[in-house]
Image (cartoon, helix red, strand yellow):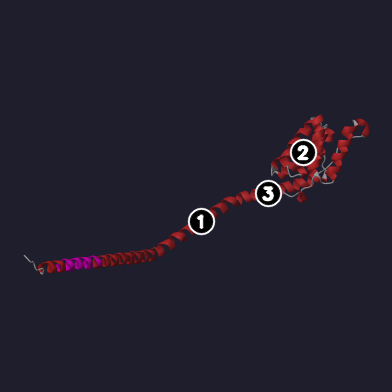
Amino acid sequence: MFKLSVLIICFSFYTLSYGSVNMPEYLLNKKFKQEFQSNHYDKAQTSISKLLEKQANNGHYLHNLGQTQLLSQKPEEARASFEKALTLLPKDQQSHTKLNLAASQLMQQHYNSAIDLYKSILKESPSNPIAKHNLELALQMKQEQQKQQQEQPNQDQQNQQDQQNQQDQQDQQAQQDQPELQDAFNKQEEEEKKKKQHAYDILDTLSQREKDARKKHMIKQQNQQGNVEYDW
């Protein structure tokens, strides 16, 4: 989303005279204007929404609502409010609403729509400075977008090539490391075999010693039995 500092937005208030409305509506309009000018856009949006609850088809209130939404970084909502306001406002009171509608389109990167609207405004008012400035800005943004879109396939292709090169390097390194890994594996396997054989040798030795001890014990017992003198 583009910063408002690079985009000129036309803000205007449709104020009401004391005698044209009832007192609560007049005071709520006054409250909205104070909140808006104090940059309290959330509060201002609440106030203007209360006015729209009573007059849902008031083009002036919809225009003011769109302005609070635009400054609250809600261009999609602002666009809907401005579009509805244009269907309700007299033609001679639509210029500011059209400028802000185009601004909301530009903030959403809908460049073609914004460009067409700025051109239509300039047909009606060729000297409009805001329309001139923002039209030039919209054209620059569109050109930059097209440039990025043209560069994107090349960038994607480069990224794919970089990934493939990285994978090739990893595969090559793996192939180089494979003999060393195999040697290490073979050495480890040989050492484990030696350890097992050593353990088996120890067991065999112990088993043989046990057999020899039993054999000597049996011979000793037989000799003792053979030397016994019987008294009949």
- Provide the residue span drawn in magenta: 206-219
Q: Amino acid at mark 1?
A: Gln
Q: Which mark is residue 56?
A: none
Residues 211 and 58: in front is 211
Q: Which callout, 3 or 1, points to the residue nearer the camera?
A: 1
* Secondary structure state at the residue bearing disc 1: helix
Judge left or right: residue 59 versus residue 138.
right
Residue 211 is inside the magenta segment: yes
Residue that mark 3 sits on:
143
From the viewer's side, name the closer residue of 182 and 200: 200
Crowdedness of circle 2 by 10 Å Cα count: few (<14), some, many (20+)? some
108 left or right, relative to 206: right
Per the model, the C-alpha gap separating discs 2 and 1 is 48 Å
Q: Quadrant of residue 75?
A: top right
- Is residue 226 shown to the viewer in this render? yes
Contact (Cβ within 8 Å) of mark 3 with mark 1: no
Question: What residue is shown with label 2?
Answer: 120
In the picture of the structure, the residue carrying the numbered disc 1 is 163
Q: Nearer the viewer, residue 134 or 177?
A: 177
Report the residue at 10% width, 68% height from top. Answer: 226
Q: Earlier in the sequence, mark 3 or mark 1?
A: 3
Give whichever of discs 2 and 1 has the lower sequence position: 2
Q: Amino acid at mark 2?
A: Ser
Q: Position of residue 126 (x, y in %)?
A: 82, 42
Q: Is residue 55 visible?
A: no
Q: Are marks 2 and 3 in contact (CB under 8 Å)?
A: no
Q: Which three-letter amino acid code belongs to the residue tagged 3? A: Gln
Q: Residue 218 vs residue 200: left or right?
A: left
User: How far apart in space, not on screen, are marks 3 and 1 (Cα)?
Assistant: 30 Å
Q: CA distance from mark 2 to mark 3?
A: 20 Å
